[in-house]
Image (cartoon, grey):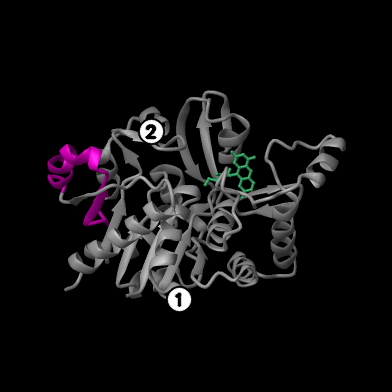
Amino acid sequence: MKIGVLAGGVGGAKLALGLYRTMDPVDLTIIANTGDDIVMHGLHISPDPDILMYTLADRVNPETGWGQREESFRVAEGLKAYGRAVWFNLGDRDLATHIHRTAMMKDGATLSQAIDSIRQALGVTARILPMSDTYVPTMLDTDEGRMHLQDYFVRRRCEPKLRGIDFEGVAAAAPAPGVVEAIAQADGILIAPSNPLISIGPILAVPGIREALRGRREQIVAVCPLVGGKSLKGPSDKMLAELGYEVSAPGVAKLYRDFCATMVVDDSDSTAKPAIEVLGVKAVVCPTIMRDLADKERLAREVLRVLHSGTRP
Ligand code: FO1
């Protein structure tokens, strides 16, 4: 079974790792959010594809879920001494990835090609596609002004009040090569339990992607990122509330229902099943919290079972 997954960073990587270990990775295509991309110290940083690749290659820092394990920060110390802003922590090994990607892109490679080069070097055998080769940074309007997502997320620790989100330049962006084809050819497509607004939202905003997904609605299963009306990690709940969305599993179903026929919700949200199904989205209830590797593999098997049982014509 060929599986496509739309994923953001840490939450997306957890499910991706479960799938990677549960199925044949050559049948797995991950479409990664690149709205989090940022240029720092002249380097193109692509956090979500990197988080996915480091996780699948077993190189990710297990404490943070981003960056590489056993990192040192000698370069960051040097940059700080030059008076450069170092609130975005770039480890020495991680910097090698950013230098390689930036050098390739300066020589004319696309972001897709740079990501594929990193993937191969790390020995990851699943396909990792950026949502687009165009730089489409997620920008937030807040009570402290307009800022890049990483500014809000890392430098300001999600404290500013959110007023709006946009993906700069997205109207002129195209899906990266292979993205629309992967959606069309997959036997099943998963929406990872990533932030609906800033991880899945940017992917959906690339012209052509949401339309391609709508054409596969019956084969699409989302894993709800909210558990008991709260995000497990990260600011999904705060961001949804500040923008006036319903902070609940049915609220997420409302955001996805035009392209997603089934949503997996946590046991603790079993009472929300009727409110999800009234929206025309089938609800499947099972444990969704991924604390350890066994949880990730169990959830992966469960979503594959749901795709297998519910999506064949
Ligand atoms: N997240 C943080 O909370 N603090 C950091 O200093 C930080 C640095 C960083 C460097 C490279 C990278 O690939 C990711 C990094 N992240 C950091 C994670 C990142 O901000 C977000 O978790 C993702 O963009 C969300 O998907």
Percent across and percent down for residue 205 are 42, 53
Of residues 225 and 43, the one nearer the viewer is 225
Percent across and percent down for residue 191 are 35, 55
Vertical placement of residue 43 versus 121, above or below:
above
Q: Nearer the viewer, mark 2 or mark 1?
A: 1
Q: Amino acid at mark 2?
A: Asp
Find numbered disc 2 in the image and state the secondary structure of the residue it sits on.
helix
Vertical placement of residue 289 versus 101, above or below:
above
Q: Is residue 117 visible?
A: yes
Percent across and percent down for residue 183 are 36, 68
Of residues 156 and 305, the one nearer the viewer is 305
Percent across and percent down for residue 110 are 63, 68
Q: Residues within 10 Å of mark 2 (few under 14, many from 20)?
A: many
Of residues 156 and 74, the one nearer the viewer is 74
Q: Which mark is residue 237?
A: 2
> Residue at label 1?
26
Quarter of the image that includes the N terminus: bottom left
Extent of the magenta region: 258-279
Q: Amino acid at mark 1?
A: Val
Specify whether residue 278 is painted magenta: yes
Inter-mark Cα distance, 2 to 1: 34 Å
Find numbered disc 1 in the image and state the secondary structure of the residue it sits on.
helix
- Relative side of 20 to 152, left or right: left
